[in-house]
Amino acid sequence: MDLDALRNADLSLLDDAVEDWSTMVGDLETLMDAAEKGLRGAANQASWAGYNATVSKEFIGKTAGEFTDAHSQASSIHKILQDTRDELKKYKGQLNDAIERGRQQNLTVIGYEGGFTVTTNVPPEGRGRQDQDNKGAITALRDEIQKILEQATTSDTSANSVLMAIADQSTLGFSDVDYADRDSAAKALKEAEELADLAKQKPEDLSVEEFDRLNKGLKEYADDPLFAERFATRLGPRGTLDFWTGVNDPHSAWRIGQQRVDQYDDLQRNLGLTLATASQSDNADMTRWKSTMIDLVDKPVGRGGGFPLGGQVMSNLMRWGDFDDRFLVDYGDKLIETEKKFTGNGRHGAWQRMGMDPLLNRTGTDSGWDPMTGYLKALSNSPDAATEFFNDTFVTKDEDHDFKDDKGKRESLTNFDYLFEERDWPQDQDDKGEDSVSGRNNLALALEAATTGHPAGEMPTADTPAHNPAQAKLMESLVSSVGDDPERLTQYGYMSDSIGQITSEYLPDMNRAMTDVPRLDADGQETEKWRDVEKLYPVAGSEAALKHNDVTKLLFAVGQNEEGYAAVEVGQKAYMGKLMDYHLDPGLPEAARVSDDQKLVIEQIASRSGEVSGTLNLGAREAIGSEASDKDKAYEHSVAQRKNWISGGVGTAVGVGTSFVATPWVGALAGGAAGTATSVILESVFQDAEGHAIEKAQKTGGQFWADGQMRNQAIAEDGARAAAEKYGSVDTGDAGMTAREAAKQGYLNAQAIVSGGAPGSNSAF
């Protein structure tokens, strides 16, 4: 900054800017609160249906989120401008004070473009000798002024750099940057540049101290948008791949490897989280970074221009964080294209790690040589990208491949079809030398995100939109696939925790399918009976149209895994309670009523719930076996543990947003109370499971099945009685007895259906 620029600066314009931004922050805070409490709150409690449930509600949620981002960004800008204004005022005052002190010492300061000079205030002809006599004072004043100008320059340029970085973060809408002051933002950018320069070094030149600083810095700043974007773009896409490849090369990084290999997993995670944060930026540099990284998916990046490929390396840095959806989908397209090239359009496997190949993944779960493993884990954190990816085409019927239909003709396959049914997964091992299950397990996690609309491993919330057509379509494919060949799931039981969670969030759709009511008549018109089914099991958003036989096979398969069993069993019981609360409420609009015969409604609800539990318990019976053992304890323990998943909000036992019936729960949850029937039911479920989990008796699968029948009847009865007592719309005793008998028959029906018989061919004995 030039001397005259600071000395003559009119900082009143900055005063105005600071005041304007202060007003903006206040206004946005008001709007943010209104959007959160009013807009989003009202949207979450409204009864959405159809297009509104899948689009409008989500749009409102995102709009409310934009107000929050706008407030954070405005607040950061206000603080940065305020800091800069205050500092420039301070430096201007220091400069004028220094010039005045110099004047009192008969020294004058003369500014010019690009610099300034300090000299004695005497006529030019005597100035040389006087300057020599006053050399010490002149030098001191010059150095003082130079320091002030340097500080002012740093203040001005760092503010400019930070403000430009914030503005560039998001082309449309607002970024979620949030800084307490300018210096913290400027420090983040400076740290990003220095750490990127460390990572650019050859791995053999990286010292242990530099490794530690890099790892520590990435951990500290991984979720800082400005840091992440600057680090990623300065290191570059190829630099990112070279860094992780080099660190894992035992020939190049032997010194670091000897002393820090136990921290490679932390570095991998911290680097991955940083890149995920960076990917959310859509400034020009980061847009080029993402495009170039996609281009590198099929390019060799190993020593000497060989394997691994860019996609094998990058996929291992995608296992954590929320990557930009568009980047993930485009990256996945290139990965599939590469997969097709290396597998002959899916004819054979690829990505097999050889004995001397270095590890690319340091989590201990797998070697990292199959790029699909890490990529699928990334999808599990990004539901929208996962849905789009699985529904995309792997091969068309016109391509050269070996996938044929029953008539021997080539058929088209989606990415889901290929990965879930056809892919030849490479053999891999974990760090214990056992067969790795990460690939297919991450596939299940990605499917969980893709079908439910929320990240895998989480429960749906009031903000989770109802299922959209793409999610429902994928669910139809999943259920049909397991129905066609249940071993696609039972052979890989570790996938069942995710598949069970998926199932629990599509219970309204499944209950509809299990009625066996025809949708259309001979003329292709919707039948009156089907309209009753839609009322009995209302669905917000898009329905997954399923077949009863496929649903039964899925439930039977899921029941063979304790975690999958628990997800569906608890979910179905909660859903039964919701339905009873919903349908027995005398305030339910006439148009939504199935029948004025409340006992008939209770019978339908309890019977269907009994069939779900019966089918699950048949699967559990299969897994426990005929020998008395403690295997049943794992099932009981998983059910009891499900209480922790719900975290005090029983409304999320079945996905909020999956049904109109969930709507009253959103309001109830907000008020800290749950519906009566569901509260009673879940309390019984958890208490029963906790008791059985600690009892000493060993059981066979048959005993588990028999006990399940009795519990199912009792719980259905308790739920119906609670709802009847709450609303007074039907006699409490009649409601309980009706539910008990219907639940018993539904439970027994499951055995007949699984065995290939007709519902009702088994009865109480």
Image (tube, rainbow, N blue to C red):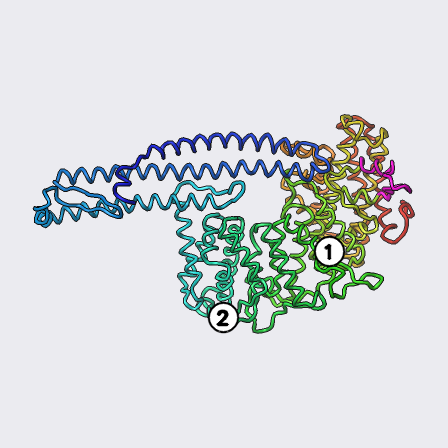
Q: Residue at x 82, y 48 (%)?
A: 547
Q: Magenta segment, which residues? A: 515-535
Spatial CA span between label 2 and label 1: 44 Å
The answer to whether one can see residue 684 in this image is no
Q: Residue 460: percent from the left, percent from the top? A: 65, 42
Asked if 216 appears above or below 134 in the picture, the reply is: below
Q: Label 1 crowding class (10 Å Cα cut-off): few <14, some 14-19, many 20+?
A: many
- Most foreground residue, 50 or 743: 50
Look at the picture and state if 681 lies above or below 623: above
- Furthest toward the front, the residue is 125
Indicate which disc residue 631 carries: 1
The residue positioned 82% from the left and 34% from the top of the image is 736
Give the foreground label among 2 and 1: 2
Task: Determine the secondary structure under disc 2.
Answer: loop
**Going 61% across and 49% down the picture, which residue do you hit?**
382
127 on left or right of 90? left
Q: Give x and y (percent) for residue 590.
A: 80, 27
Disc 2: which residue: 250
Q: Which mark is residue 495?
A: none
Q: How many marks?
A: 2
